[in-house]
Image (cartoon, grey):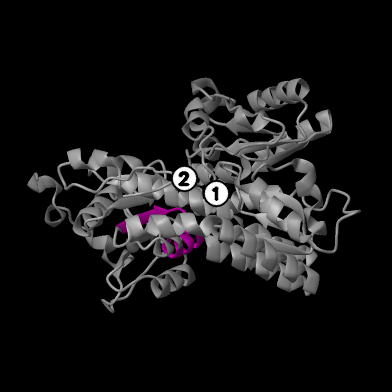
């Protein structure tokens, strides 16, 4: 192997040494910082964070006030499937150029909004500010108010210039924007056994699967925010009895505002893996204190696990002892992945997130095995260093981590952005096991210079060595 790609040749930046921690080392660990200059962070900007959160609201108009490059940057970044309208799949931009940078772009924004609203007739419009707008000082709020008066359609400014902070700052801006619609709809007819599902983006239909679980046990899902989202559902979500927050990084701020203004309690949950999905269903049923709800939840969990457990046991025989690295956006997803990989007999040797808090990392430390490297706001070189150093069989991440894995000759599983297979719930865990096995045990790795791996084939029962 070329010495330029060996772990010894890759160094951690001095300013980042306390954001890299090995379980059992005893040293201090810090997080929630601005990215170190020169580290080429895997994080995205505040604008990207805001658009990722609001984009799946399918019957709203989403327009980026800024240069065309900003609109292209994260267009359709998550897929976000819709059961109806597809307006969110379009990427609209005011395409600010030199003239608007000098003289201002408010006139162009107003004309663009009026034209788009008249043509598409959306339920609402979200207007995203970009870096250039923050610099030239366009009054986006005033333009939105003016267009709302003219068209009768709520135009909501999203305060998201990229330099405002990290992706996490964008999440908060998105929650503030979404909250402006909350409380403007009729809550009549909502069941006393009702929830909002926050932080599910319906990348491959997961929101539909989760909604079906709750409907089967007798709990109404008032709104999924924001996967397969609808403006009218957001308007009446304050009528729900409980908020279940899945992606804690993106939606905790909105859940806290719903609790402060409407008294709706929240619970952090995950629907990834058998254990976490069952725990989420039980937590909701237990909150309502109804014995029939709990009984139906137990029956559902029992039947679903019986259906898919044999598949997992078969894959566990093939994957036992394999090592995995994971680097994801939010910490709650990391918790679930560590547990799910352990269910498959695999060991997590590297775990990291872009937006984890001190509390999140304490929990991650607890569930990881001794020797596991934990990283906050990592960069490609660091990730490459530890993937090689730990001799990883599988890397789990998003679209930006895929090239790192493939360049190192390591199997990759996309858990964030471009996948087309649902990975949530009981059925999703079976899909995950299948994808992990076919990736980590593929015969293609015998052609990689690092090492060879055994092959996975399929028989009548579905799997074999």
Question: What residue lies at 55% left-to-right and 24% top-to-bottom?
Answer: 95
Which sits in the foreground, 361 or 173? 361
The reply to whether discs 1 and 2 touch (Cβ–Cβ < 8 Å) is yes
Give the percent coordinates (x, y) of residue 141. 69, 40
Q: Disc 1 designates what residue?
A: 170
| Mark found first going from the N terminus, 1 or 2 | 2
Q: Can you see residue 181?
A: no
Which numbered dot is residue 89? none
Which disc, if any, is residue 45? Answer: 2
Where residue 133 appears, as percent x and y from the top left, is 55, 36
Which residue occupies the foreground of this view, 103 or 87? Answer: 87
Q: Position of residue 420 (x, y in %)?
A: 51, 38
* Percent coordinates x, y for residue 322 in the rendering: 29, 58
- Left or right: where 196 falls relative to 393: right
Query: Element at badge 2?
Result: loop
Q: Quadrant of residue 302?
A: bottom right
Looking at the image, residue 4 sits to the left or right of residue 380; the answer is left
Q: Which residues are magenta?
A: 323-339
- Residue 329 belongs to the span the image colors magenta: yes
Residue at 19 percent across and 47 percent down: it is 452
Determine whether, in the image, residue 101 is placed left or right of residue 344. right
158 versus 279 height, above or below: above
In the displayed orientation, state which residue is furthest to the front: 460
Q: Residues within 10 Å of mark 1 (few under 14, many from 20)?
A: many
Q: CA distance from mark 1 to mark 2?
A: 7 Å
Residue 127 within the segment the image draws in magenta: no
Instruction: Give the tally of numbered discs.
Output: 2
Q: Nearer the viewer, residue 35 or 346?
A: 346
Q: Is residue 438 left or right of residue 291?
A: left
């Amino acid at each position: 192997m070329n010495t330029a790609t060996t772990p010894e040749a890759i160094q951690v930046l001095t300013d980042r040494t306390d954001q890299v921690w090995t379980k059992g080392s005893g040293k201090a660990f810090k997080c929630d910082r601005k990215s170190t200059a020169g580290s080429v962070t895997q994080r995205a900007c505040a604008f990207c964070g805001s658009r990722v959160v609001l984009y799946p609201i399918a019957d709203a108009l989403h327009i980026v006030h800024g240069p065309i490059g900003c609109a292209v940057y994260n267009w359709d970044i998550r897929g976000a499937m819709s059961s109806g309208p597809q307006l969110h799949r379009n990427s609209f931009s005011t395409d600010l150029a030199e003239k608007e940078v000098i003289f201002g772009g408010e006139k162009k924004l107003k004309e663009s909004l009026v034209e788009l609203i008249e043509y598409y007739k959306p339920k609402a419009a979200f207007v995203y500010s970009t870096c250039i707008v923050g610099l030239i000082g366009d009054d986006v709020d005033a333009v939105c108010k003016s267009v709302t008066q003219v068209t009768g359609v709520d135009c909501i400014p999203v305060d998201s210039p990229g330099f405002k902070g990290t992706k996490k700052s964008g999440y908060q801006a998105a929650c503030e924007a979404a909250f402006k619609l909350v409380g403007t709809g009729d809550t009549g007819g909502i069941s006393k056994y009702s929830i909002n599902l926050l932080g599910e983006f319906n990348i491959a239909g997961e929101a539909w699967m989760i909604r079906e679980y709750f409907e089967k046990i007798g709990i109404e899902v008032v709104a999924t925010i924001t996967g397969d989202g609808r403006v009218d559902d957001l308007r009446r979500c304050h009528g729900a009895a409980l908020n279940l927050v899945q992606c804690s990084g993106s939606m905790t701020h909105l859940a806290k505002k719903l609790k402060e203004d409407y008294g709706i309690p929240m619970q952090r949950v995950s629907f990834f893996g058998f254990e976490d999905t069952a725990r989420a269903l039980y937590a909701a049923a237990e909150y309502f204190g109804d014995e029939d709800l709990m009984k139906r939840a137990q029956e559902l969990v029992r039947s679903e696990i019986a259906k898919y457990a044999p598949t997992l046991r078969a894959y566990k025989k093939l994957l036992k002892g394999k090592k995995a690295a994971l680097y994801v956006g939010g910490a709650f997803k990391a918790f679930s992945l560590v547990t799910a990989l352990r269910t498959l007999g695999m060991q997590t040797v590297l775990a990291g997130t872009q937006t984890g808090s001190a509390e999140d990392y304490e929990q991650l430390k607890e569930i990881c095995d001794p020797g596991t490297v934990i990283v906050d706001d990592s960069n490609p070189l660091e990730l490459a260093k530890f993937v090689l150093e730990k001799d990883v069989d599988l890397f789990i991440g998003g679209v930006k981590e895929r090239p790192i894995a493939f360049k190192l000759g390591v199997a990759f599983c996309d858990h964030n952005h471009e996948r087309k297979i649902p990975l949530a719930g009981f059925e999703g865990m079976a899909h995950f096991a299948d994808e992990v096995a076919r990736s980590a045990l593929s015969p293609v790795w015998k052609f990689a210079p690092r090492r060879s791996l055994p092959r996975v084939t399929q028989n009548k029962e579905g799997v074999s060595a």
